[in-house]
Amino acid sequence: QVQLVESGGGLVQPGGSLRLSCAASGSIFSINAMGWYRQAPGKQRELVAAITSGGSTNYADSVKGRFTINRDRAKNTVYLQMNSLKPEDTAVYYCNADRVLTPTGWKDYWGQGTQVTVSS
């Protein structure tokens, strides 16, 4: 069984920074891509940023230039550095591991979510 454990959420003032971490554990042979999604109240879950096993990254337009995603493949861990945070960044942030290969085959996994609140 694969588990994704997130950490780093919290309350921050506008203009502040937070760093989210997500560690995947279990019988993992490989992970295609890891990423972060977010869901604000009353809105659909949306992609924030993703990074492939080769290091290619993809960002939502709303976070480009403010957020940075990176990945430690050896530790199956992905990080999201969030700078210049805005109130509209407030949401539950979910970690995703895409196409995880385990002894039982390929599957996608999600973390439990971590709350990020940007408010003065």
Image (cartoon, rainbow, N blue to C red):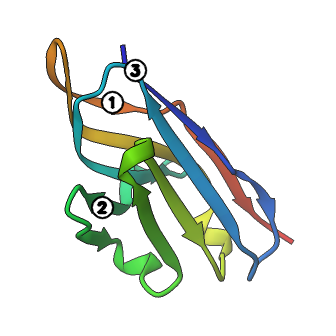
Mark 1 crowd level (few <14, some 14–19, many ≥20, 10 Å Cα): some
Image quadrant containing the N terminus? top left
Estimate the x, y position of residue 29 in percent, counting from the top left.
23, 30
| Kind of residue at badge 2 | Ile
Q: Are marks 1 and 3 in contact (CB under 8 Å)?
A: no
54 lies left or right of 92: left
Disc 1 secondary structure class:
strand
Tell whether label 2 touches label 3 (CB within 8 Å).
no
Is residue 59 found left or right of 5 in the rendered image?
left
Q: Percent position (x, y) of residue 108?
A: 25, 31
Which of the two marks, 3 or 2, is nearer to us in this view? Answer: 3
Q: Which residue is mark 3?
A: 26
Report the residue that reaches farthest toward the bottom. Answer: 65
Q: Is residue 110 above or below residue 27?
A: below
Residue drawn at x 41%, y 52% is: 37
Relative to 13, say whether 117 is above or below. Answer: above
Residue 109, labelled with which disc? 1
> Which residue corresponds to the image point at 80% horizontal and 67% vertical from the top-left?
119
Task: Tell me the amino acid under the disc marked 3.
Answer: Gly
Mark closer to the chain start, 1 or 3: 3
Q: Residues within 10 Å of mark 3 (few under 14, many from 20)?
A: few
Residue linked to disc 2: 51
Distance Cα–Cα, label 3 vs label 2: 20 Å
Give the CA distance from mark 1 to mark 2: 15 Å
* Whether residue 41 can be seen here: no
Mark 1 or mark 2: name the one nearer the start of the chain. 2
Query: Closer to us: mark 1 or mark 2?
Result: 2
- In three-dimensional space, the C-alpha distance between marks 1 and 3, rounded to whole angstroms, equals 12 Å
Residue drawn 57% across the image and 50% down it: 21
Give the amino acid type for the residue marked by disc 1 in the picture: Tyr
Label 3 secondary element: loop
